[in-house]
Image: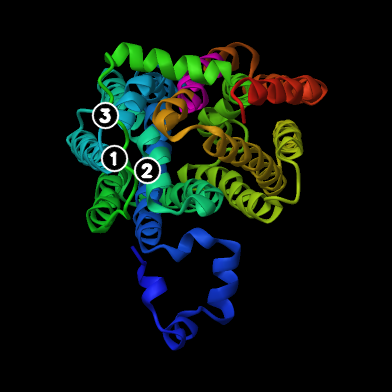
Amino acid sequence: MPTAAENASPEQSVTDQPSGLKARLLEAFPAFAGRDFRLYFVGQIISMIGTWIEIVAQGWLVFEITGSAFWVGVAAAASMVPTLFLSLFGGMLVDRYPRKAVLLWSQVFLMLLAFAFGAIILAGLATIPVILFLAFLIGCGTAVATPAIQAFISEIVERKHLASAVALNSSIFNASRVIGPVLAGLMITWIGTGGAYLANGASFIAVIAALLAIKLRDVAPRPKNTEHPIQSIRDGIAYAWRHPLIRTIVIFVAVVSIFGWSFMAMLPVVAKRIFGIGADGMGYLYSAFGFGSLCGTVVVSASSGRVHSGKLVVGGILTFASGLLAFTFTTVLPVALSFLFISGLGMLTAFATMTGTVQRLVEDRFRGRVMSIYLMVLLGLMPFGNLMMGFVSEHLGTALTLRGGALISMLAAIVLFMKRKEILRAWEQYKASIGT
């Protein structure tokens, strides 16, 4: 059947061609050509700004109540633990049921929790057990929503624009990380942590409205999955483990997630103990890292097809670890912000490249489960890093703890670089074995 584009007259086709700045924007970010992705992008970035407000508010609230770096780590871990245990279940749901519906209801659930959390704080009922319980419930909703987001992207863009969409989805996370923490610091100062949580609840309205407005393009129906859920999860794990490149990425992400990225849970402690700044100043620390990450999105997009992905991953992690290491040796805030910017640039360059690589390699029938495994390792193992960071920080100091994590991340990148030829040989053998 001819498409609308094929039925259009030559004059109409010429008229509809974008020009000038718009043409250059679509050339750099072709995923924006689709209406559905534009709706998703706007709704999700507003929602993610709210999520970062919540993340910063939680760390500040816990540190104000307890004065303990350990409990800050425990609270951060409570919101991440469900990802470890429920991501595989969420991936199975995403591969079995309509991805839009799974994503929509998970957002509604998270919105209601944010409003409830804010009301409890404003009522003066926020104790550590209550905070940990609600953080755990938020983590449960996120464990389902995150693989749904990753899989849903493939349904709202053309396959040739998938790499662009993945990079832009990463930019959502990181642009919000620039704006959200600054707003969180101001909100905590002006209206308290309870108001910050209510603002997060309101931000979900944007993404829910966007999802309701999205009209999915025609996609090939997925075969009905009648397997037992446990067997379906096992099949996804087996597929990811047999695939040499996906397996390597997952293992590498596990190491960096535990020892590297978990440093962010300690930023409230660093803000107060090392720099002597309040909630507004703490927001600048998060935002410096987030702004660097946002710039990393541009690096990945500009390097797509020009620079080997392995170089981007290794170079990105080395840049991240070097910036973090330098950050721990300064007590001058502007210098510290510049090192966090460098660290964020490297981290996003590596992780956006790895996420895009997994998205391109995975078969669509396994997409939800494989992305849930990837995200389970990326986010689900972070609680162990948060707990470790909090515990070691209490006994050896925060700076020394962050240096150890940075050095381990560096070592992992060096090992990956040294093993690159073996990994590529295994990939070629795997392709030959499946006849591609």
Does residue 109 sit above or below 432 in this rendering? Answer: below
Q: Are marks 2 and 1 in contact (CB under 8 Å)?
A: yes
Out of 194 and 358, give the one closest to the viewer: 358
Task: In this rendered view, identify the residue nearer to me: 176 or 266.
Answer: 176
Magenta highlight on residue 384: yes
Q: Give the labeled residue for mark 3.
A: 224
- Look at mark 2 in the image and give the residue it sits on: 152
Query: Where on the picture, by quarter, is residue 360?
Result: top right
Q: The disc labelled 2 sits on which kind of residue?
A: Phe
Q: Is residue 281 left or right of residue 428?
A: left
Q: Kindly check if marks 3 and 1 are in contact, taking CB atoms under 8 A apart as contact.
A: no
Q: Nearer the viewer, mark 3 or mark 2?
A: 3
- Determine the secondary structure under disc 3: loop
Question: Start and end of the magenta stretch?
Answer: 374-389
| Badge 3: residue crowd in 10 Å (few <14, some 14–19, many ≥20) | few
Numbered tag placed on residue 103 in the rendering: 1
Q: Earlier in the sequence, mark 3 or mark 1?
A: 1
Q: Comparing marks 3 and 1, which lies closer to the viewer?
A: 3
Q: Is residue 274 magenta?
A: no
Q: Main secondary structure of the magenta part?
A: helix
Measuring from the top left, give residue 390's x and y in whole percent: 53, 18
> Which secondary structure, mark 1?
helix
Q: As drawn, is 98 to the left or to the right of 148?
A: left
Q: Where's residue 292, x and y in %?
A: 63, 48
